[in-house]
Image (cartoon, rainbow, N blue to C red):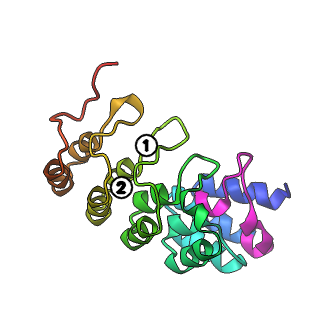
Amino acid sequence: MPATYADLIAAIKDRNEEAARRILDLDATACQARDENGISAMLWAVYTGQSPLAEYMQQLRDEIDVFEAAALGDLTRIDELLTADPGIVNAVSVDGFTPLHLAAFFGHPEVVDFLLARGADVNRVATNASFVQPLHSGVAGRNLEVVRLLVENGAHVNATQQGGYTPIMAAIQNGDQEIEALLRRHGAVGDSANPPPA
């Protein structure tokens, strides 16, 4: 990996957007960087709350993949990718998430709606230690419209993730009363943000 690529990943993880932009000005190809696990610099920027930096990198890239597009909410790119290969609607990223998980967590209801219409598995479990389903991601992302779309399309409202947490526990813990009420209307149970005993 070129030094500028590693430096860019490090700057992004340190949330040093100024340094990251300097690196990209020095070597625009660094926008293609991926860490040792294969997670792209662009996704790291979104993961660390630096979406403007991710969007800047998108301008430097010829194309982005379905996971990056889902995290950024780029519906046009997702449409292009799924038109070319419909099967990737349920593809899993190197860190264990589907496009639906990412769109749900980062609060892109129009992308969530599109992915569901194209056959995304609303109850797909992440292939990492979190064991989250898209509904867990949507509740964690605190977007009411995303949560509504997921539950109305069959998301299991009492599904558990790592530690036995259910979506309603997260809603209660976050103080999201509208999301809590929506989940309850769809059959969610639970009165505490504490997980059940192991």
Disc marking residue 97 = none
Residue for badge 1: 132
Estimate the x, y position of residue 79 in percent, counting from the top left.
54, 77
Badge 1 local density, few (<14 within 10 Å), some, or many (20+)?
many
Decide which of 158, 15 is in the foreground and name it.
158
Say which mark, if any, is on residue 138: 2
Please state if 156 lies on the left or on the right of 48 as rendered. Answer: left
- Could you tell me which residue is drawn at 50 percent across and 76 percent down? 75
Asked which secondary structure carries label 2, the reply is: helix
Residue at 58 percent across and 72 percent down: it is 82
Q: Quadrant of the N terminus?
A: bottom right
Does residue 16 appear in the picture of this structure?
A: no
Spot occupied by residue 110 in the image (x, y as percentages of width and height): 39, 73
Q: Amino acid at mark 2?
A: Gly
Q: Is residue 25 magenta?
A: yes
Compare residues 159 and 24 and report the one nearer the observer: 159
Question: Callout 2 environment at 10 Å: few (<14), some (14 to 19), or many (20+)?
Answer: many
